[in-house]
Amino acid sequence: MRDLNKYSLLLAGMCSLPHLALHAEDYPEYKVSGYVMLDHDIFDASFTENGDESQSKSEIRRARLSLKTQWNDNWKSKFQLDVSDGVEVKDAYLQYQGWQWLDVTVGQFKEPFGL
């Protein structure tokens, strides 16, 4: 839980860059997405020795939550957390796409191509 508080401060810092979108009318745009995988198990009492008590258990197996922000036509950012056994940052970057010949990305991110 301590790690989650640290990452939520990083997320708040990335989302509070209003000076990048001062002259834009339609920006900033936020997109929140993710998924949660929940396991639930019910064990009927007829399968136990005593037959006296049913059992059930629920737990979150995996969750991935992400926030993408488009500040204006040139600036965007992404923050993505993976929660399984612990909390891990998958993507956390700020990207500038203002030049036709170069995109600058700073932070932790996946490669945009592969085999």
Image (tube, helix red, strand yellow):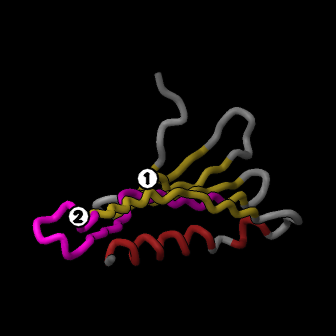
> Where residue 6 sits: x, y (%)?
39, 74
Percent x, y of residue 78: 58, 56
Q: Residue at x 53, y 29 (%)?
A: 113
Looking at the rendered image, the quarter that the N terminus falls into is bottom left
Q: On the image, which quarter does residue 3 sit in?
A: bottom left
Residue tagged 2: 46
Could you tell me if the residues under marks 1 and 2 are in contact, i.e. CB atoms within 8 Å?
Answer: no
Q: Secondary structure at mark 2?
A: helix
Q: CA distance from mark 1 to mark 2?
A: 44 Å
Front residue of 43/112: it is: 43
- Identify the residue shown where x is 77% and y is 58%: 72
Front residue of this view, candidates 73 and 32 = 32
Residue type highlighted by circle 2: Ser
Please state if 111 lies on the left or on the right of 25 as rendered. Answer: left
Asked if residue 97 is positioned above or below residue 19 in the image, the reply reads above
- Of all residues, the one furthest to the right in this rendering is 25
Residue shown at the point (47%, 42%) measured from the top left: 110
The x, y position of residue 88, in whole percent, is 36, 59
Residue 7 left/right relative to 65: left
Q: Is residue 108 above or below residue 20?
A: above
Classify residue 67 as left or right of residue 43: right
In-front residue for pair 70/33: 33
Q: Quadrant of residue 58?
A: bottom left
Q: Which residues are magenta?
A: 44-68
**Label 1 amino acid?**
Lys
Disc 1: which residue: 90
The kind of secondary structure element at disc 1 is: strand
